[in-house]
Amino acid sequence: MSDAATAARPVIEAENLARRYEVGGGLFREPGIVRAVEDTSFAVHAGKTLAVVGESGCGKSTLARLVTMIEAPSAGRFSIDGVEVTPERWAELRSDVQIVFQDPYGSLNLRQRVGAILEEPLKINRPRMKAAERQEKGREMMRLVGLREEHYDRYPHMFSGGQRQRIAVARALMLEPKLLVLDEPVSALDLSIQSQILNLLNDLQQRMNLAYLFISHDLSVVRHVADDILVMYLGRPVEFGPKSEIFDAPRHPYTKALISATPSADPSRRQERIKLVGELPSPLNVPPGCPFAPRCWKAEDTCRENRPRMEGAPHPAACFFPEA
C-alpha cells in the first residue's frame, strides 16, 4: 500500500458498534437488556482528536472499553490501522491502543515505584527487551512528559495529582501506541493543573502524530482539544461533526442544550440556558421512537413513534426537526 493511502486510512474506524448487557431475569422471567451502546460509527485519523460527549450513562465509558478491547462488542465491527479487531487478535493489537484513566490516584499501583510502573508494559509485551533498555525507555518517557529523572525511583504517593497523571500518560505511551483513549483525563484535577495536562497532550499529539479518543462531559475542555465531536444520548449517537460546526450551529436539540449549559469566559457572550424537563429515561426501558423525545421541546407525534436516522447537512444529526 502506498504512503498516501496509508496516511489517508483512519487509525480507528468503527461501524455500527453495539454493546448490550443482560440484567435480572430468573426462573420465570426473561432478563432485561441494557443497550449501553447502539449503532455507533466513527473514524479517527492520526494527529486528530475525536471527542465523545454526553451526560453520565450515555455510553461514553462503555465505548472506551470496546475500543481498548476490554470488552467485545455485541454487534458491529471496528478496525485498527486497517486490521479488523476480533478477540483472537486482541493480544497483537492491544499495543496499538492505550488508555489514560480519569483518576490518577486510583490508576497507579501505590506499592510500585514509578520506574517499575513504566517498565511493566514492556515486560509484558516486549519480553525480549533487556532491563537496561526498558529503564532507558522509561526515563526517556518521563522526560517527554515533563518529569525529572530523579522521580524514577519514587512512589506515586509522593507526587501531586497533576504529576500522577503525567506518569499515567507516560505509561500509556511506553508501547508507542497509535491511538490513545483519554477517559475524562483532567476532570479529577484542579483547574490550574488541567490546562497544563491538556497542553501536554496537545504537544505529545503533534510530536508523535497520535490519534485521540477524548471522552468528556465538559464541553469547555472539548472546545479546546477536539477536532470532531460525537454527541451521545442513552447509548446512541445523536450528532457528529467538526468542532466548529457543532459549537457554532448545533443541529440536535440535545446538543444545543448541552452547549447552553457550558460556562463562558467571555462576559459579552450571553446565551439563554436551556433547561431540560424530566428525567433521563431508564436504559432498561428506552422509549420508542427518538429516545430524547420525552425531554425535547420540539417533539411531535412522529418523534415518539419513529426513530430518526443520523443524516442531513452540513453534518449528520438524528432529529426529524433539527435546529436551523
Image (cartoon, rainbow, N blue to C red):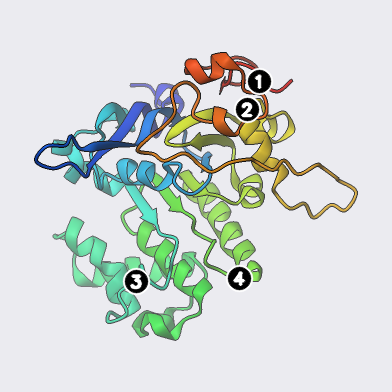
Q: Note whether 53 is above or below 17 in the view shown.
A: below
Image quadrant containing the C terminus: top right
What secondary structure is found at the residue carrying circle 1? loop
Q: Looking at the rendering, which quadrant does residue 196 occupy?
A: bottom right
Position of 120 compared to 199: left or right?
left
The disc, 4 or 1, on the residue closer to the chain's N-terminal end is: 4
Asked if labels 1 and 2 touch by Cβ distance under 8 angstroms, the answer is yes
For residue 252, the mark is 2
Which badge, 2 or 3, is on the more N-terminal residue? 3
CB within 8 Å, label 2 to label 3: no
Mark with earlier residue (4, 3): 3
Mark 4 — residue? 190
In what element is the residue under mark 3?
A: loop
Q: Residue at x 43, y 61 (%)?
A: 169
Q: Which residue is mark 1?
A: 322
Which of 77 and 61 lies nearest the eye of the viewer? 61
Q: Residue at x 70, y 23 (%)?
A: 323
Q: Residues within 10 Å of mark 1 (few under 14, many from 20)?
A: some
- Mark nearer the viewer, 1 or 3: 1
Mark 4 and mark 1: span between their CA atoms?
A: 37 Å
